[in-house]
Image (cartoon, rainbow, N blue to C red):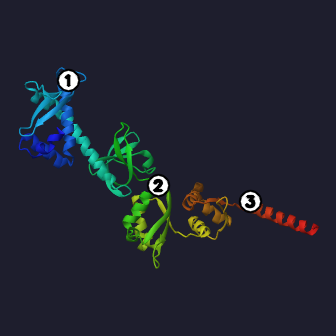
Amino acid sequence: MKTNLKKILTARNEFSAALNQICAEREIEPEVVLESVEEAILAAYKKDYDWEEGAEYEVDIIPETGELRILKDKKDITPAGFGRIAAQAAKQVILQKVREAEQETAVEKLLQKKGKVVSGSIFRREGSNYYVLINKVEALFPKKEQIPGEKYELNQRFRFYIKGLGETRWGGQTVIVSRADPDFVVQLFTQEVPELMAGSVVVKAIAREPGQRTKMAVAAVRSGIDPVGTCVGQKGVRVQTVINELGGEKIDIIQYTPNPVQFIQAALSPAEKIEVKLDEKKKVAYVYGDSEQLALAIGKDGQNVRLATRLTGWDIEVMSEDKQKATAKKTEEKKKEEKEKKEEE
C-alpha cells in the first residue's frame, strides 16, 4: 500500500478524494489513515473468512479505481462482495484511528506551548481530577495541580500553565496543565508586565503555597528600572490582575540582591529591623529582633519564614527572645572563660 501512496493520493476516484479530504481537514499524514484502513480491512476479513496463521496478508489498493483487494502471500484472494462488508466493518475502526491521530497531532501542537499560559474550559470531571478542553485537546488537570479551595464548574473558563506530557489512567498520552505550579505565577506576570516579556526585568526566585501566598524575587537587567515597582504597576494594577486570577492569593514581590543578608531580610517582609547572622558552613541564617518583628518574620503557622527559606535557599532560624538570651549568656560565659584562662597564663 505504501509503495502506491503517491498514485493513490493523485488518483481521481471516491477513495482518493475521501483520503485527501480527511488528511486536509484533520491535519494528519496520509500514511496514518492508510495504515488504519489496512488494519480495519484485515480485521474484517479475519473475522468472517478463513485465516491461515503464518501466511502474509496485506491490503492492496488499485490507484486508478480505489478498489480494495486482499492479498495472501502476494496472491489475490478477495472474496466476492467483500468490498461492501469491509467498508462497513472498517468504518468505526477508521474513525477511531483518525480521532486518535487527530488527538496526537493536537497534543503535539499544544506541547509546543509548554511553559506558557493558555485559556481553556473545564470539560469533565473524573474523581478528584478534571479534564480541560484547550484547542480541541482534553488536557488533564490533576488534583495536585489544582489550587486548594478553588472551585471548578463545567464549562467554566480559566487560564492554565502547560506543564508537560503525562498519561491517563488508561495509558494514553495527554497534556498536563496546572494552576498550582510556581511558574504559573511567573507566566501570569510575564503576560502583564512588558518589561518581563522583554527581559529587562527577570524573576530570580519564587516560592509558593498555592491559594495562600507567593514570594517572588525580581531584578532589573538594566539600570534605571525599579523591578518591584514595574511588577506591581501603577496603583498596583499589574499585581492585582494576577491576584484576581489566583482568587485572592497574597503576593509579595521583593527586590533580589546577591547579598544574602539583605536578601533574607527582604524575604522575611513584612518584618522590619531584624538582624541576620550567617553560618556559611551550615548555610543557616539566624534572625534576631524584638518579639513583634520576629512574629511577623515567622508568619501565621510559620508560613512567612517557610516561604523565605525556599525563596533564598538558606535554612532560616528565627531566634526567640529566650533563644537570644540563652545565646547571649553562652557567649558571655565563653568570653569569661577565655579571660580567666589568659589571667592564669
How much space separates mark 3 and mark 1, taking CA atoms?
A: 83 Å
Pointer 2: what residue? 211
> Does residue 115 appear left or right of residue 59 in this picture?
right
Looking at the rendered image, the quarter that the N terminus falls into is: top left
- On the image, the x and y values in percent for residue 78 come to 11, 26
From the viewer's side, name the closer residue of 318 and 173.
173
Type of amino acid at the residue the image marks with label 1: Lys
Q: Residue at x 84, y 63 (%)?
A: 333
Q: Earlier in the sequence, mark 3 or mark 2?
A: 2
Number of other residues with Cα within 10 Å of mark 2, as a class: few under 14, some 14 to 19, many 20 or more: some
How much space separates mark 1 and mark 2, taking CA atoms?
A: 56 Å
> Does residue 313 appear left or right of residue 342 in this picture?
left
Q: Earlier in the sequence, mark 1 or mark 2?
A: 1
Pointer 1: what residue? 47
How much space separates mark 3 and mark 2, taking CA atoms?
A: 34 Å
- On the image, the x and y values in percent for residue 258 come to 56, 69
Type of amino acid at the residue the image marks with label 2: Gly
Type of amino acid at the residue the image marks with label 3: Asp
Q: Secondary structure at mark 1?
A: helix
Q: Earlier in the sequence, mark 3 or mark 1?
A: 1
Relative to 307, residue 220 above or below: below
Relative to 52, residue 211 above or below: below
Looking at the rendered image, the quarter that the C terminus falls into is: bottom right
Pointer 3: what residue? 322
Q: Secondary structure at mark 2?
A: loop
Observer able to see residue 81: yes
Indicate which label's residue lies in the foreground, 3 or 1: 1
> Which mark, by number, is residue 246?
none
Number of other residues with Cα within 10 Å of mark 1, as a class: few under 14, some 14 to 19, many 20 or more: few
> Does residue 295 appear left or right of residue 172 in this picture?
right
